[in-house]
Amino acid sequence: MKTTFNYDHYYKYEELKSSIEQLANEHPDIVEVENICTTLENRQVLAITVTNKKTGAATSKPGFHIDGNTHAGEVTGSMAALHTLDYVVTNYGVDEEITKMVDENTLYFVPRISPDGAETYLSTPYTLRSVNRDYLPEDGGLYGKDLDGDDVIRMMRIKTPYGAWKKDNDNPNLMVHRAPDDKTGDFYQIYTEGMIEDYDGVHIAPKKSSWGLDFNRNYPMGWFPESRQSGAGKYPLSNPENKAMVEWVLNHDNICGVLTHHTSGGVILYPPGTKPEAKAHFEDMKIFKAVGQMGKEEMGYPAVNIFDNFMIDQENYSSGAFDDWCYQNQGIYAYTVELWDLNSKIGMPTDWTKREIPSPKEQEVKFAAVVKWAAENAPEAFAEWKEFDHPQLGKVEIGGFNYKFLFQNPPCNLLKTEVENTTKFSLRFIKTLPQLVIDNVSVNEVSEGVYKVEALVSNSGYMPTYLSKEAKSLKVAKPVTVSISGIDEVVMGEEVTNIGDLNGFAHINSGAFFYGNITTGKYDDITKKVSWIVKAKKGCEITVTATHNKSGQASKTVIC
């Protein structure tokens, strides 16, 4: 895929910012950049609008939103958002399909929602959830620290007769569980490479992260306090980045679809995440599944419901997420794309129809498979165990995986393929949005200076103009309006006519019935006729305009 930039590494803030600014400077007719939030470390959360300004204002066209880096370490997401932006902008005016897309739609991008958190992740050995801001810190325990100076926090194994692990007999880099009857040999405990705060010489327990804020638990839909879910924040939208994202969506009422990029797991998640799919609108789930199937075709990742297939604990489920807020508060079709699937790479794909905790033996097999795969495909992602003199624990061994760029994100040599596949899905998703068209406008003189004007207004998109049944239930869906101008007076009809909703072809009642015959049954109107009786001067130009906040605007002019 032709792009301006190379996707062979992960961009820190300045490189990401300069890349976005370069695209804006090289394509000023279609790209605008704005800062929607200045972080506590004085970085900008950049939002990019892409549309052909000559074909109408950005908010007058169907909109589509893509973002990344809700979570600091999920930097593949920001690279995927940048790649789609880059591909669209670079190929505008060259590729006919992309040009038409940008002429008729508006694409919005927020590639890095947490620039402070991502910068810490990319510039230090540390991992963190969303942002490097202290949140309910606690003292005491083992905290991650790069002790051997390789810029990676790996694993640390400590020999002890009370250990639960032992070395594999055939490969000392592998660890296997100690059997219940194992009484002789060397045994180990395995911890994160690091130091122990308030060490008493005996107890080693993980320290709770002081950087535990989770932006995807801070949105209003399904928010619960810290006692229910960690990282939720003091109250909904207490994080300025979360508040900025909600205001961004609310200020762009034309947004119909959302892709929010995360890692990892290789799965495309769709709402609701707060209740079973069976309790949601059947028609909406049909669209979620159909669009999700396109994602599977392009990315190889299945589309599954968040609550039914992703949540292991359906009593104390996690919520307060962006996708649920978009759908269950605004009626917008939103997917969380969990990029990068190491499990499939090692030949052990996740079965999303049954979420089971793997047995100890299965864990060992997986560990060995990852070591083997890394040696063949990303040798820099695994380090053999080496002795180290720990200042608190004495002789230990440090080694193992680079979690950041093996489990959480793809190794750099595989990044390009991952983001290209994501862009392919994004482009297909955009094509499903509702789109107003005026098929025909006729003018017939009924008496001198009096004319009958008829217009056929349609929705050429897959989605209906109201988007979702959820939007109608929430009463946020708006009607299509049709106006007439260029005439002297409207004698019959309204100058601005409310024609309600226009169906999309998603909900055409059609299937194979009656022993194999394909039959189209009754379905809601995709096309509606609007009529006026008007007074007008001979030869004047009469313009009919259809307008909708989600479906855009269409006009047609005829000579009277």
Image (cartoon, rainbow, N blue to C red):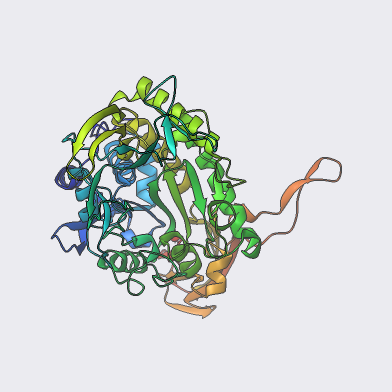
* Point 28% across, 38% down: residue: 154
Seen from the viewer's position, the closer of residues 14 and 149 is 149
How far across and how far down the image is residue 132, in percent?
22, 57
How far across and how far down the image is residue 14, in percent?
14, 46
Can residue 560 be seen here? no
Task: Answer with left or right where residue 75 lies relative to residue 25.
Answer: right
Seen from the viewer's position, the closer of residues 420 and 128 is 128
Is residue 204 positioned above or below 148 on the image? below
Is residue 196 positioned above or below 342 on the image? below
Task: Answer with left or right where residue 285 lies relative to residue 347.
Answer: right
Q: Quadrant of residue 96?
A: top left
Can residue 499 be seen here? yes
Task: Answer with left or right where residue 539 lies relative to residue 209.
Answer: right
Q: How many marks?
A: 0
Seen from the viewer's position, the closer of residues 340 and 188 is 188
* Point 30% across, 56% down: residue: 207
Q: Dividing the image into 4 quarters, which one contains the N terminus? A: top left
Task: Answer with left or right where residue 467 lies relative to residue 422.
Answer: right
* Point 39% across, 38% down: residue: 161
How far across and how far down the image is residue 459, in percent?
54, 57
How far across and how far down the image is residue 307, in percent?
56, 58
